[in-house]
């Protein structure tokens, strides 16, 4: 009531509030304008730097450049991005020339500084650079980052370790390939392919017996990238007495990948397994390695209660090299079950369209 009875005080309070709000608006406008100005200046600086360094890196691909301009700490991130773009885009001798140019400007030191940055983007650039430079002095830092909770950071660090020394990296990384569910299988497969079967096969086979059952199905799939000398023995041991049904299908995939005739009996025993996905995988494996003795068992699966089993059996029969078009047509006509005829006809049509 006191305020309402004092109009002058109310006017003064309203005026102060208006001035305060106006001041805040002006301050916010100032911050926005300053931020925009800073961003524009940074982008202009980045474009000027790129305009200088793009021709220099391109020229360094033709002949080694002894004299290169110094790199300011403000331009380090831009140079890391540009250098890695060239490195990932080119192959062969270009890598050696780019590495020489990197040595002339101390790119490894720039990357090492960025490794300690708070920015995730700068860290990723640093890790990729150190890997591409084969910077063995950063091994302990990269090994620690390969254990990081961030999938992006850990994967990039793992790839860097492989590029520095794949043989040294594999024993430490293979357990992570099995356990890190947040690492996409395709990404892991790409790293194993980069390391090569000669390097990756031994560690993959060795770790199978040391891997927890919950991670074993994931690890077994990667054995398809190993050489048969290392990849087949652990799979054969597991199939003799599988600890759980869920590891059987991945093991059958490995057998199908190598298609060793000695494994036919191991595959055939799973054609009648209670779980349909195992029957389907056994049928698919026989499509890669089966003989004339497998025509009858695969034909029997054409009337399986599960569609996927019928489909894989039909694909397997169509894929057998000793069954030509005439033989498959007769096999289709001989089927009394309508579903068996339909699934065989579908598999034949898909083969003809492929």
Image (cartoon, rainbow, N blue to C red):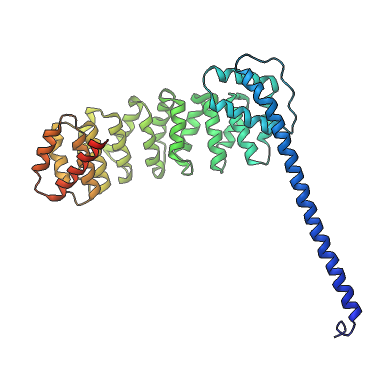
Name the image quarter holding the N terminus.
bottom right
Against 333, residue 65 (above or below) is: above
Q: Is residue 139 visible to us here? A: no
Q: Quadrant of residue 74?
A: top right
Is 101 in front, or is 351? Answer: 351
Is 119 in front, or is 241? Answer: 119
Q: Quadrant of residue 83?
A: top right
**Residue 238 placed where, x, y %?**
31, 37
Name the image quarter holding the C terminus.
top left
**Residue 298 placed where, x, y %?**
17, 40
Is 268 positioned to the left or the right of 228 in the image?
left
Q: Is residue 291 visible to us here? A: yes
Is 21 positioned to the left or the right of 107 in the image?
right
Residue at x-position 67% and y-position 33%? 78
Residue at x-position 73% and y-position 43%? 39
**Residue 64 placed where, x, y %?**
64, 14
Is 211 positioned to the left or the right of 26 in the image?
left
**Residue 324 placed where, x, y %?**
15, 31
Residue at x-position 41% and y-position 38%? 211
Q: Quadrant of residue 226?
A: top left
């Amino acid at each position: 009531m006191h305020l309402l009875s004092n109009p002058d005080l109310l006017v003064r309070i309203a005026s102060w509030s208006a001035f305060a709000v106006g001041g805040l608006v002006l301050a916010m406008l100032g911050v926005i304008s300053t931020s925009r100005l800073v961003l524009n200046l940074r982008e202009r600086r980045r474009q000027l730097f790129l305009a200088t360094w793009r021709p220099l890196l391109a020229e360094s691909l033709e002949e080694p450049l002894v004299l290169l301009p110094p790199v300011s700490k403000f331009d380090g991130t831009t140079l890391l991005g540009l250098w890695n773009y060239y490195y990932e885009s080119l192959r062969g001798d270009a890598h050696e020339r780019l590495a020489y140019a990197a040595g002339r400007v101390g790119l490894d030191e720039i990357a090492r500084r960025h490794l300690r940055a708070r920015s995730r983007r700068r860290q990723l650039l640093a890790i990729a650079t150190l890997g591409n430079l084969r910077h063995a002095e950063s091994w302990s830092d990269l090994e620690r980052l390969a254990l990081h909770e961030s999938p992006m950071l850990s994967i990039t660090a793992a790839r860097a370790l492989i590029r520095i020394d794949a043989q040294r990296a594999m024993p430490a990384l293979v357990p992570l390939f099995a356990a890190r569910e947040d690492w996409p299988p395709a990404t892991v497969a790409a790293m194993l392919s980069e390391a090569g079967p000669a390097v990756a096969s031994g560690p993959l086979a060795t770790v199978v017996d040391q891997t927890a059952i919950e991670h074993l199905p994931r690890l077994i799939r990667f054995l398809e990238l190993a050489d048969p000398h290392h990849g087949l023995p652990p799979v054969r041991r597991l199939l003799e007495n599988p600890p759980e049904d869920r590891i059987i299908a991945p093991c059958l995939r490995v057998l199908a990948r190598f298609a060793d005739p000695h494994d036919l009996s191991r595959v055939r025993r799973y054609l009648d397994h209670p779980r349909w996905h195992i029957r389907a995988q056994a049928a698919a494996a026989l499509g890669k390695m089966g003989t004339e003795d497998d025509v009858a068992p695969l034909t029997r699966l054409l009337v399986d209660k599960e569609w996927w089993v019928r489909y894989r059996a039909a694909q397997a029969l169509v894929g057998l090299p000793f069954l030509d078009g005439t033989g498959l047509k007769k096999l289709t006509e001989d089927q009394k079950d309508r579903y068996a005829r339909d699934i065989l006809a579908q598999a034949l049509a898909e083969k003809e369209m492929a």
